[in-house]
């Protein structure tokens, strides 16, 4: 019996500024959307748990700043995250190119088992669409990404998105004891050594 | 939309005995808390402005009118609750007990709303409104949560008053107040008649008789206070006579108890009859003494600062002219308070969390539990054949196994002296040590606790205790080392910040609408980094800073009715540039070494949660400063 606190699996939300990253997280965690009214939620780290396949998966969703000048800081945020949600605005072609750039970066620098989702937000503004759904879908297929078009305003597909991510996450609880050591990007030497030892043992058997 | 700092919940019925016991503890604790004063402008229900001084003491909140004096009869009536120092400020017109307070809300950065059980609510303008509300809230929660015995360990204070909920206002009554508040903003003209009527209205106010009656009912509490004073006397005497502690303590106890009233005589007889009981009582007695000693030391330190603070308050002139009053209400005006005062106030906020925690330990026996816990875990670890870090091996478990707290610290110091050269490895070893103890303690706790929430809370407390135990004795050494290591980078960042200060808001990417906001309060809160020691203290300050940032943005938008480009949500796009700007203006030195220290020593389990997010923001904004161009 090991003690299991809700050790949240970290999800980072990336994308150009103004595509609705915070709104998306807010819709999922609080089921709220604020267009004209003032938001009452202050925290920029959202948490929620989801029940998938007889397991409770705890999300802690990290919002980031999308402006160009802060892009170089993103690695500090997405370090050790389990999943990355890359958001673009379907009414802005520029934001889709930005999303492609993020996908490339995450493929290069992210962990091996990182789950990446490409999200076209603001699907309720279909009249002003600039990015065709087919183009994005093909791109997602090519790069093996989760793809959905969501609307934080209406809540369309937002729940689905996080459920899909929860299903895709590699066994969350199994990693907890190991994970204690290097949650903040401090790679402990002992852990690496242990891994090597285990490999050796396996070979012997 | 407001920031509710404190709100009461419903109490369950309790036994009278447990109430008495907790009441005594509460009173002893509250009376030991330092007295603080805030100069405020009170706004009553009819919108009248009166300059007042709020004095927070162990008894309650004193409403003081400056430039007036209590009559001698009044002084005699109040002598049970007040010292002479209280009268020095002015006339004490009413006393609000903490149990009377229902709700404390921060309407604006400098406007606090206090709602009472029996009275109508008051609003107070105060430059230190944020701290005023937090301090009242912490004192209220001490009173409130000590009575709440639903859980064997009351950890609610820890979590509760850190979590400040933003709540939407649907109530009409509250909306009315909000509208009132908008009328009070400096842009609108104040009707002069109201201010002129101030003096006549003041004379009508009489000391609340109800309050006095309530206080008279609590005379028993004062008797308890006498008991406590005697214990303090004992403490001094015992220190001189270390050799024959037990005997002397018995004698002292007996003597003092004879001096006390009839209630205690029965106890005395019992003590003489049973020696075994005496021993048990002595143990408890020692604990109380230790606790009192810690409190006394703290109080002495705080009192010194408080004296300074009192002097400063006297120096602030408050003229009677209505125009000047209006200026003091101007929210955007630069505040007068000196840095020391603010640092002190923030320190109080931090301290109270630990204060409450200490009383809880004392009252519900966590101290004893924790004392047993560490040797237990170490035993478990050794039984399982887990290789402990060198710290324990070198000390052969003896020092740490012994329950003497000083030994533990001594051994750590000795370890440090031996390993001074390899000090860079220390962070990892200490972390490892903490983790292993933590995993085992959780198992032990799980046997006795059932609820997951309780375990989580206990987990936080263990973490803090461990930090207090392990890191605080070696803090200076660690700090020296990290500072030396990062000296050049610290200097680099310092130089860059000096240049960045001259830059406009645009440079940081702040949206134009937000550039007019006065961020000085946030910077001042962040500046309290200078007095933090342990990692969790730093993280607390980061959380409060973030809260204040969101609060200032939200209230600004609310009051000025700004049409923002996209929506009114405070997004992650806004927060980082604001935080960088706040950081640049906070005048903290050694930023790199602080971030290094926090990364190395703070609780790794917290890193995926909220405090981890803000620590990341902190680190990344340092990175931003480091990589900023076009200086």
Image (cartoon, grey):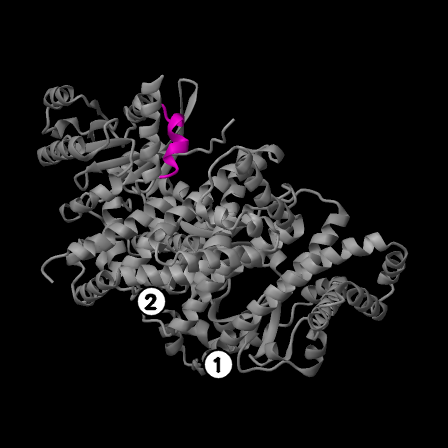
Of residues B607 and A145, which is closer to you in this image? B607
Disc nearer the start of the sequence (2/1): 2
Of residues A104 and B281, which is closer to you in this image? B281
Magenta stretch bounds:
A170-181
Question: Mark number for residue A136?
Answer: none
Q: Is residue A121 magenta?
A: no
**Residue A39 percent coordinates (x, y):** 33, 44
The answer to whether residue B183 is seen in the rendering is no
Q: Separation of disc 2 and disc 1 at Cα?
A: 29 Å
In which chain is the residue bearing label 1? B
Q: Nearer the viewer, mark 2 or mark 1?
A: 1
Residue at figure coordinates x 17%, y 53% from the top left = B509
Residue marked by disc 2: B186
Of residues A48 and B239, which is closer to you in this image? B239
Q: Is residue A180 magenta?
A: yes
Residue marked by disc 1: B311
Of residues B287 and B165, which is closer to you in this image? B287
Label 2: how many Cα within 10 Å (few below 14, some 14–19, many 20+): some
Which element carries disc 1, helix, strand or loop?
helix
**Residue B166 percent coordinates (x, y):** 41, 47
| Position of residue B152 in the picture relative to residue B545 (left or right) | right
């Amino acid at each position: 019996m090991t003690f299991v606190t809700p050790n949240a699996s970290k999800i980072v939300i990336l994308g150009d500024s103004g595509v609705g990253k915070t709104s998306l997280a807010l819709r999922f965690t609080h089921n709220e959307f604020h267009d004209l009214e003032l938001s009452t939620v202050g925290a920029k780290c959202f948490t929620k748990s989801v029940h998938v396949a007889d397991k409770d998966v705890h999300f802690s969703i990290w919002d980031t700043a999308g402006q160009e000048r802060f892009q170089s800081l993103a690695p500090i945020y997405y370090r050790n995250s389990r999943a990355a949600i890359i958001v673009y605005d379907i009414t802005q072609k520029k934001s889709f190119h930005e999303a492609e750039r993020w996908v490339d970066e995450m493929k290069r620098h992210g962990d091996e088992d990182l789950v990446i989702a490409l999200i076209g937000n603001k699907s309720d503004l279909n009249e002003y669409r600039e990015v065709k759904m087919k183009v994005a879908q093909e791109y997602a297929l090519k790069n093996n990404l989760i793809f959905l078009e969501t609307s934080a305003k209406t809540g369309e597909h937002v729940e689905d998105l996080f459920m899909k991510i929860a299903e895709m996450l590699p066994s969350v609880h199994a990693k907890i004891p190991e994970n204690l050591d290097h949650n903040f990007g401090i790679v402990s030497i002992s852990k690496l050594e242990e891994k090597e030892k285990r490999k050796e043992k396996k070979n012997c058997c | 939309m407001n920031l509710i700092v404190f709100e009461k919940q419903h109490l369950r019925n309790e036994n009278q005995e447990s109430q008495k016991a907790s009441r005594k503890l509460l009173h002893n604790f509250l009376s030991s808390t330092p007295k603080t004063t805030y100069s405020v402008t009170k706004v009553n229900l009819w919108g009248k402005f009166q300059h007042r001084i709020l004095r927070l003491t162990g008894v309650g909140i004193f409403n003081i009118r400056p430039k007036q004096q209590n009559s001698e009869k009044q002084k005699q009536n109040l002598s049970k609750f007040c010292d002479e120092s209280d009268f020095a400020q002015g006339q004490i017109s009413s006393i609000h007990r903490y149990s009377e307070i229902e709700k404390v809300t921060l309407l604006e950065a400098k406007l606090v709303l206090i709602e009472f059980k029996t009275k109508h609510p008051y609003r107070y303008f105060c430059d230190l409104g944020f701290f005023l509300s937090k301090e009242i809230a912490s004192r209220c929660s001490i009173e409130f949560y000590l009575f709440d015995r639903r859980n064997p360990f009351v950890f609610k204070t820890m979590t509760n008053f850190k979590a400040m909920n933003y709540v939407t206002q649907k109530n009409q009554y509250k909306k009315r107040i909000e509208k009132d508040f908008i009328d009070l903003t400096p842009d609108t003209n104040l009707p002069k008649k109201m201010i002129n009527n101030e003096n006549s209205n003041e004379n009508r106010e009489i000391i609340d008789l109800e309050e006095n009656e309530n206080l008279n009912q609590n005379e028993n509490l004062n008797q308890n206070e006498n008991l406590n004073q005697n214990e303090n006397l004992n403490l001094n005497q015992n220190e001189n006579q270390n050799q024959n502690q037990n005997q002397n303590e018995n004698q002292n106890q007996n003597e003092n108890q004879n001096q006390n009233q009839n209630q205690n005589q029965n106890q005395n007889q019992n003590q003489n009859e049973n020696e075994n009981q005496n021993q048990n009582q002595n143990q408890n007695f020692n604990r109380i003494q230790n606790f009192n000693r810690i409190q006394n030391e703290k109080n002495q330190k705080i009192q010194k600062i408080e004296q300074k603070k009192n002097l400063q308050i006297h120096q602030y002139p408050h003229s009677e002219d209505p125009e000047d009053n209006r200026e003091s209400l101007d929210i955007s005006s630069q505040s007068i308070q000196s840095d020391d005062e603010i640092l002190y106030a923030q320190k109080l906020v931090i301290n109270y969390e630990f204060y409450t925690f200490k009383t809880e330990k004392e009252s519900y026996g966590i101290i004893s539990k924790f004392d047993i816990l560490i040797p237990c875990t170490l035993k478990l670890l050794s039984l399982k054949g887990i290789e402990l870090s060198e710290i324990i091996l070198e000390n052969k478990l003896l020092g740490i196994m012994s329950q003497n707290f000083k030994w533990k610290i001594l051994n750590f110091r000795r370890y440090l002296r031996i390993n001074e050269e390899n000090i860079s490895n220390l962070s990892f070893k200490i972390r490892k040590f903490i983790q292993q103890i933590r995993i085992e303690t959780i198992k032990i706790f799980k046997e006795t606790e059932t609820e997951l929430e309780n375990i989580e809370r206990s987990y936080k407390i263990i973490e803090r205790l461990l930090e207090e135990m392990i890191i605080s004795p070696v803090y200076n050494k660690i700090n020296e080392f990290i500072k030396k290591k990062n000296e050049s980078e610290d200097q680099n960042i310092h130089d860059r910040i000096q240049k960045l200060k001259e830059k406009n808001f645009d440079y940081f990417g702040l949206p134009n609408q937000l550039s007019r906001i006065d961020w000085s309060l946030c910077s001042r809160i962040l500046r309290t980094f200078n007095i933090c020691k342990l990692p969790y203290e730093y993280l607390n300050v980061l959380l409060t800073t973030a809260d204040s940032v969101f609060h200032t943005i939200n209230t600004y938008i609310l009051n000025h009715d700004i049409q923002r480009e996209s929506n009114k949500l405070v997004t992650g796009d806004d927060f980082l540039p604001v935080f960088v700007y706040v950081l640049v203006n906070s005048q903290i030195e050694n930023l790199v070494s602080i971030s290094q220290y926090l990364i190395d020593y703070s609780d790794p389990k917290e890193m995926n949660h909220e405090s981890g997010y803000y620590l990341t923001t902190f680190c990344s904004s340092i990175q931003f400063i480091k990589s900023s161009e076009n200086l």
